[in-house]
Image: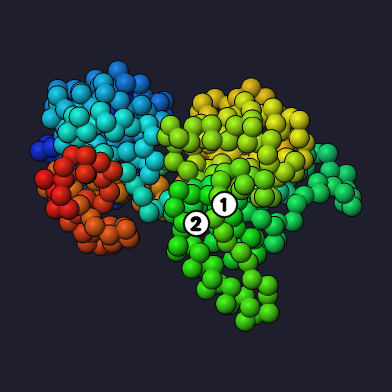
């Protein structure tokens, strides 16, 4: 039996590309092999450490696709540079696991996979919101444990979200989509905090209100909060959609949790370290009516002590983007990022990435996050 976790496709390809995990679907592989890449895929489900990845990069390599669970820092970018790598792509839209300065110093473009996670991740935020508001996890465990002895007037009383105030921290693509889902579906009033006003979201709400008024329904509101604090004090449910960087680490800490309503709901589908998880455990212990829905954790895959035992917390293992369409789409974009650089294509200049899923995808690189730092013009260096 072959115990080598690395599976090789198109062995005689002119370029050598390593992929640190098996990816869903086949299209991504077809894209790379059509670009004449020998593709080496690690089939192990274990998170690869830097030494293992470095030895996989070896002496000669042209491209790499890595995971958000791996730390792509100076050691790996120096190894990629020494091996002659032309492009790295993260299999994720977020790239907090990548040292961009180190990549840029090594002259390596870093790709990511935006545009295919938006609705999928927003839908998971919606699912967690309702799971937390209606005690879904706790009620299911209760039922499965054989503790249901019959309907009762006060069994698992939850919170009606219709018309309540929803706070969005980070009204980018995913945050704004979640906001639209909650205000269209559930008439929620929106308050958001972001560095810049989201004019598209605000004009969407204005248009939606014309429709509501025509239907004899009261208009909903959408306003930008002056501060995170003002949002936390006002909202009945708060959902976090920021990137993780030095300005957002522990953005939600003990002090800010204490500003929230005692029966508020906190949702996090962004990155775990944005919430101080130990502080959240403490807060949930002392505020039994407070609820949280978490897809991400501060020290994944390890949970803060006590978190798993809390009945007022709903937890899922970082699966917000886990639909077949999205995960295959992420693989396609990551492959197009690497193949596009190897083929000398220009950067894609549109935000709509759906053309990459059509029969004849554009001859372009979908998404590179450090083009300016590399001195690339729109048409590439
Ligand atoms: C991403 O792409 O950054 C997501 O967290 C994956 O689920």
Q: Position of residue 316 (x, y in %)?
A: 58, 39
**Residue 21 placement: quadrant:** top left
Q: Residues within 10 Å of mark 1 (few under 14, many from 20)?
A: many
Cβ(mark 2) to ligand 1 < 8 Å?
Answer: no
| Residue 18 seen in the figure | no
Give whichever of 66, 205 is nearer the camera. Answer: 205
Number of numbered discs: 2
Give whichever of 89, 8 is nearer the camera. Answer: 89
Q: Position of residue 214 (x, y in %)?
A: 62, 81
The residue labelled by disc 1 is 225
Q: Position of residue 209 (x, y in %)?
A: 58, 73
Q: Position of residue 300 (x, y in %)?
A: 50, 28
Give whichever of 259, 116 is nearer the camera. Answer: 259
| Image-based side of 233 in relation to 146, left or right | left
Residue at (28% x, 36% y) in the render: 65
Q: Residue furthest top?
A: 51
Give whichever of 65, 265 is nearer the camera. Answer: 265
Q: Residues within 10 Å of mark 2 (few under 14, many from 20)?
A: many
Residue at (56% x, 46% y) in the render: 227
Whether residue 9 is situated above or below residue 197 in the rendered picture: above
- The kind of secondary structure element at disc 1 is loop
Where ligand 1 lies, by quadrant?
top left
Give whichever of discs 2 and 1 has the lower sequence position.
2
Residue at (24% x, 31% y) in the render: 103
Identify the image quadrant of the C terminus: top left
| Image-based side of 111 in relation to 58, left or right | right
- The kind of secondary structure element at disc 2 is helix
């Amino acid at each position: 039996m072959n115990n080598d976790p690395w599976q090789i496709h198109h062995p005689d390809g002119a370029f050598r590309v390593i992929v640190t995990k098996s990816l869903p679907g086949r299209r991504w592989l077809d894209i790379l092999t059509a670009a004449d890449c020998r593709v080496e895929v690690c089939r192990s489900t274990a998170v690869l450490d830097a030494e293992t990845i470095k030895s996989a990069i070896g002496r000669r390599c042209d491209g790499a696709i890595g995971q958000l669970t791996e730390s792509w820092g100076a050691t790996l970018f120096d190894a990629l540079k020494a091996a002659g790598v032309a492009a790295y792509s993260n299999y994720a839209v977020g790239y907090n696991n990548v040292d961009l300065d180190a990549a840029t110093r090594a002259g390596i473009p870093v790709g990511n996979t935006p545009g295919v996670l938006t609705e999928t991740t927003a839908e998971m935020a919606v699912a967690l919101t309702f799971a937390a508001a209606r005690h879904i996890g706790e009620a299911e465990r209760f039922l499965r444990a054989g503790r249901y002895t019959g309907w009762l007037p006060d069994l698992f009383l939850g919170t009606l979200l219709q018309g309540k105030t929803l706070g969005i921290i980070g009204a980018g693509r995913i945050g704004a989509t979640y906001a639209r889902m909650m205000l269209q579906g559930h008439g929620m009033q929106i308050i958001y905090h972001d560095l810049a006003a989201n004019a598209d979201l605000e004009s969407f709400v204005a248009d939606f209100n014309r429709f509501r008024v025509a239907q004899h329904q009261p208009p909903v509101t959408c306003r930008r909060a002056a501060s995170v604090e003002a949002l936390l004090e006002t909202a009945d449910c708060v959902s976090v959609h920021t990137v993780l960087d030095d300005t957002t680490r522990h953005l939600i800490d003990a002090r800010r949790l204490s500003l929230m309503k005692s029966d508020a709901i906190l949702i996090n589908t962004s990155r775990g370290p944005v919430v101080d998880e130990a502080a959240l455990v403490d807060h949930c212990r002392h505020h039994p009516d407070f609820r949280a829905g978490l897809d991400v954790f501060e020290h994944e895959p390890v949970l803060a002590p006590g978190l798993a035992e809390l009945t007022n917390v709903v937890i899922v293992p970082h699966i917000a983007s886990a639909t077949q369409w999205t995960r295959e789409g992420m693989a396609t974009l990551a492959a197009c990022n690497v193949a596009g650089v190897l083929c000398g294509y220009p950067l894609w200049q549109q935000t709509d990435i759906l053309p990459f899923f059509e029969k004849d995808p554009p001859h372009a690189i979908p998404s590179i996050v450090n083009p300016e730092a590399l001195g690339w013009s729109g048409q590439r260096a």
